[in-house]
C-alpha cells in the first residue's frame, strides 16, 4: 500500500503550521507566500483562503487580494466573505463596489432563520463597516438588526450610541445613550458619551431637554441630570435637582453631601458651601452633620486662600468665616474636629485680622481644652510666632522648649518646627554657631516637614560663614521682617550690602531687598532690581529677579517691556522654574490665549 498520500498530507500540514507560525511572529510576507502556495494547490480549502486574506490584509496588499476574494465569491456568497469583499474594495478605493458588497451582505441576512444567526451576522456586517469608516452603513446594519430582533428591547443601543457620537448626530445619539443606560445603568459610560456629544455647539439644549424629561420619571436619570448640569456649569440648577433626589428618596442629606463633596473637589466653592450649609441647617442630629461640618470648613479654607491670593478679601468676609466656625463649635464643641475649627479661628485672627491678643487667647484655649490632640502642638508654635512678633524673645524660647517636651510623641512634626524656631531665634540673637548646631539635626531628618527649610538655612550659614558680622545683621533683618518692621529690615539689608559689597552675601541681601520692596509695592522696587542685574550679571538668581521685573512692568501696564523680559528668561534660562509661567504670561499679554 502506497504511503505517498499520507506523506503529501503531512507535508501540507507542516507548511500550514509554518505559515501560522510566521503569521504569529509578525512575518506576514513569508506567511502570505506559504498561504498562497497552499491555496493555489487546494483552492477548495477555506482555511487557506482565510490565511491568504489575513496576511495580505496585514501587508496592505489590497489590490492583490481583491481578485482572490472575487474568485471565492464565485464559490460561496457567505456574509463573512461579502464583508471581507466590502472592506477590501473600500481600502482599494473601489467605493462603489464596496457599497454593492455591503448591500448584498445586508440583504442576505433576510434569509437567516434564527435570532442567533441574525445577531452574529448583523454584528459582523456593522463592525466591518465601522472598521473602514463607513459609519452610516454600520448604523443601517444595526437599525435593520433592531427591526428583525424586536424581542430584544433597545437592541444595539451600545453600538448605535457610539456610532452617533462618532458622526456627531446629537439627537439620535442621546436617544441611544439613554437607551443603553436603561439597560445597564453604568454612570461612567453615559457620562463619557454625553461629554463626547457636548463638543457639538447645539448639543447642550438637545441633551438638556432629553435628560430633564427622563429625570422626572427615574431617579437614576435624575442623578445623570445632576452630573450634566454640573458639566455645563449650571450649578444652581444641579443643586435643585440634587435636592429633589434627596427628598424623593428620603436620603436625609446623603445626596446633598455627595453633591457638595464633588463641587468642592471641582473648585466650585460657593455652591459647595450652599450644599454643606443645607445639611448643617438640618441640625446636629442629621446623620451627615459631622461630615458636612468638615466639608464646610474645607470650603472656607479654600475660599479664604483663593480670595487672599487674588487680593480680594475683606475683614467683613473674614469675620463671617470666623462666625461660621464659632457656629460649628457651638454645635459640636468636643473632639478633634472642634480643636481644628478653633485653630482655624486663631489663624484667621493672627494672619488676617492681625489681632495678636485675640489670637493668643484662642491658641492658649486650644492648649488648655484640647491638649490631647495634635493641633495643640501647632497652636503652641503659633504662640512662639506671636511672642517673636511682640519681641518677647525669652518667652518664645520658653514656649519652644515646652512644646518639645510636651508634644514629642503627639505631634513630632510640630516638635521639629519648635526646634527650628530655636535655631532661628539663635540666629536672631546673633549666636550663629548655636543656630548651626540646632539645624544639623533637623536638616538630616528627611521625613520631617521642616527638613528642607532647615537644610536651606544651614547651607546659607555655612556658605557665608566668613562674614560673621554680616550674618548677625542678617539675623536681625529676619526678626524685623517677622515683626513687620519693614523699614528697619530694609535699612539692615542696605547695611549688609554696603558692608559686604561684591560678595554672595551682598547678592542675597540685594535679592531679598527687592522681594520685600515688591511685597510692599514700593516704587523703588524696579530701581533696586535693575541694580541687582547690573551688579550681579552672572548670578544664578538672575531669572528670579527678571521675573520680578516683568511683573512690575505688567503692574505698570508696560506690556511690551514685560514681554521682552520674559522672552529673555526663555532664551537665557531654558531650565528655569519660571519658563512655563513666562510662556503662559507672554501668550496672555499677546492675546494668544
Image: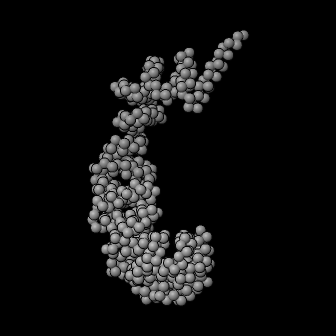
Query: Residue 197 appears at what percent x and percent y?
Result: 34, 48
Count up the numbered dots: 0
Q: Residue 48's spot in the image, x, y percent?
A: 55, 22
Can the viewer see residue 320?
A: no
* 238 sits to left or right of 15: left
Q: Residue furthest right?
A: 1
The colour scheme of the drawn protein is: one colour
Q: Nearer the viewer, residue 123 or 588?
A: 588
- Residue 271's spot in the image, x, y percent? 35, 68
Q: Is residue 519 above or below residue 74?
A: below
* Residue depicted at 43% across the width and 33% down the height: 128
- Can you say whether 143 is above or below 226 in the image? above
Task: Give above or below for 243 relative to 7.
Answer: below
Q: In this orientation, which residue lies closer to the viewer: 337 or 252?
A: 337
Whether residue 578 is visible, yes or no, is yes
- Give the left or right position of residue 398, taking residue 500 as reference: right
Q: Quadrant of the C terminus?
A: bottom left
Q: Which quarter of the figure has residue 224? A: bottom left
* Point 48% across, 80% down: residue: 473
Q: Quadrant of residue 559?
A: bottom left
Residue at x-position 56% and y-position 25%: 31
Residue at image point 43% right, 76% down = 498
Q: Is residue 413 left or right of residue 535?
A: right
Location of the N terminus (image quadrant): top right
Drawn side of residue 325 relative to residue 40, left or right = left
Q: Quadrant of residue 536?
A: bottom left
Q: Nearer the viewer, residue 225 or 329?
A: 329
Amino acid at each position: 500500500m502506497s504511503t505517498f498520500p499520507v506523506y503529501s498530507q503531512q507535508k501540507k500540514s507542516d507548511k500550514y503550521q509554518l505559515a501560522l507560525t510566521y503569521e504569529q511572529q509578525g512575518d506576514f510576507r513569508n506567511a502570505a507566500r506559504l498561504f498562497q502556495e497552499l491555496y493555489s494547490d487546494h483552492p477548495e480549502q477555506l482555511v487557506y483562503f482565510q490565511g491568504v486574506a489575513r496576511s495580505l490584509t496585514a501587508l496592505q496588499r489590497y489590490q492583490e487580494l481583491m481578485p482572490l476574494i472575487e474568485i471565492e465569491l464565485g464559490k460561496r456568497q457567505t456574509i463573512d466573505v461579502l464583508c471581507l469583499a466590502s472592506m477590501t474594495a473600500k481600502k482599494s478605493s473601489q467605493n462603489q463596489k464596496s457599497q454593492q458588497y455591503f448591500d448584498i451582505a445586508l440583504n442576505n441576512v433576510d434569509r437567516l432563520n434564527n435570532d442567533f444567526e441574525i445577531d452574529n451576522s448583523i454584528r459582523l456586517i456593522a463592525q466591518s463597516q465601522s472598521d473602514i469608516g463607513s459609519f452610516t452603513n454600520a448604523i443601517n446594519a444595526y437599525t435593520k438588526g433592531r427591526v428583525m430582533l424586536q424581542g430584544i428591547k433597545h437592541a444595539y443601543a451600545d453600538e448605535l450610541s457610539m456610532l452617533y457620537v462618532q458622526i456627531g448626530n446629537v439627537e439620535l445619539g442621546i436617544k441611544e445613550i439613554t437607551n443603553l443606560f436603561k439597560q445597564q445603568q453604568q454612570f461612567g459610560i453615559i457620562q463619557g458619551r454625553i461629554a463626547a456629544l457636548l463638543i457639538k455647539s447645539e448639543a447642550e439644549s438637545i441633551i438638556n431637554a432629553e435628560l430633564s424629561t427622563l429625570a422626572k420619571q427615574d431617579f437614576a436619570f435624575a442623578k445623570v441630570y445632576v452630573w450634566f448640569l454640573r458639566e455645563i456649569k449650571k450649578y444652581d440648577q444641579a443643586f435643585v435637582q440634587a435636592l429633589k433626589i434627596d427628598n424623593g428618596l428620603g436620603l436625609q442629606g446623603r445626596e446633598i453631601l455627595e453633591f457638595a463633596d464633588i463641587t468642592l473637589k471641582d473648585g466650585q466653592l460657593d455652591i459647595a458651601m450652599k450644599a454643606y450649609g443645607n445639611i448643617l441647617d438640618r441640625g446636629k442630629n442629621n446623620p451627615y452633620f459631622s461630615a458636612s461640618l468638615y466639608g464646610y470648613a474645607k470650603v472656607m479654607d479654600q475660599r479664604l486662600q483663593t480670595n487672599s491670593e487674588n487680593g480680594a478679601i475683606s475683614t467683613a468676609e473674614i469675620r463671617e468665616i470666623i462666625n461660621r466656625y464659632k457656629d460649628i463649635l457651638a454645635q459640636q464643641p468636643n473632639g478633634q474636629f472642634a480643636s481644628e475649627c478653633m485653630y482655624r479661628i486663631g489663624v484667621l485672627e493672627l494672619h488676617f485680622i492681625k489681632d495678636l491678643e485675640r489670637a493668643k487667647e484662642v491658641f492658649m484655649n486650644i492648649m488648655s481644652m484640647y491638649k490631647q490632640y495634635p493641633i495643640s502642638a501647632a497652636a503652641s508654635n503659633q504662640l512662639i510666632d506671636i511672642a517673636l512678633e511682640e519681641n518677647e524673645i525669652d518667652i518664645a524660647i520658653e514656649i519652644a522648649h515646652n512644646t518639645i517636651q510636651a508634644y514629642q510623641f503627639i505631634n513630632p512634626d510640630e516638635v521639629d518646627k519648635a526646634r527650628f524656631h530655636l535655631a532661628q531665634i539663635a540666629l536672631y540673637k546673633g549666636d550663629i554657631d548655636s543656630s548651626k548646631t540646632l539645624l544639623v539635626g533637623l536638616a538630616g531628618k528627611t521625613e520631617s516637614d521642616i527638613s528642607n527649610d532647615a537644610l536651606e538655612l544651614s547651607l546659607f550659614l555655612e556658605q557665608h560663614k566668613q562674614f560673621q558680622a554680616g550674618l548677625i545683621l542678617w539675623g536681625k533683618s529676619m526678626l524685623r521682617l517677622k515683626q513687620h518692621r519693614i523699614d528697619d529690615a530694609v535699612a539692615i539689608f542696605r547695611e549688609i550690602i554696603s558692608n559686604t559689597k561684591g560678595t554672595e552675601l551682598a547678592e542675597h541681601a540685594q535679592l531679598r531687598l527687592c522681594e520685600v520692596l515688591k511685597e510692599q509695592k514700593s516704587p523703588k522696587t524696579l530701581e533696586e532690581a535693575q541694580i541687582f542685574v547690573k551688579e550681579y550679571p552672572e548670578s544664578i538668581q538672575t531669572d528670579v529677579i527678571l521675573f520680578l521685573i516683568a511683573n512690575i512692568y505688567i503692574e505698570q501696564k508696560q506690556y511690551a517691556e514685560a514681554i521682552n523680559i520674559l522672552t529673555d528668561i526663555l532664551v537665557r534660562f531654558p531650565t528655569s522654574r519660571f519658563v512655563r509661567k513666562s510662556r503662559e504670561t507672554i501668550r496672555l499679554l499677546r492675546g494668544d490665549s
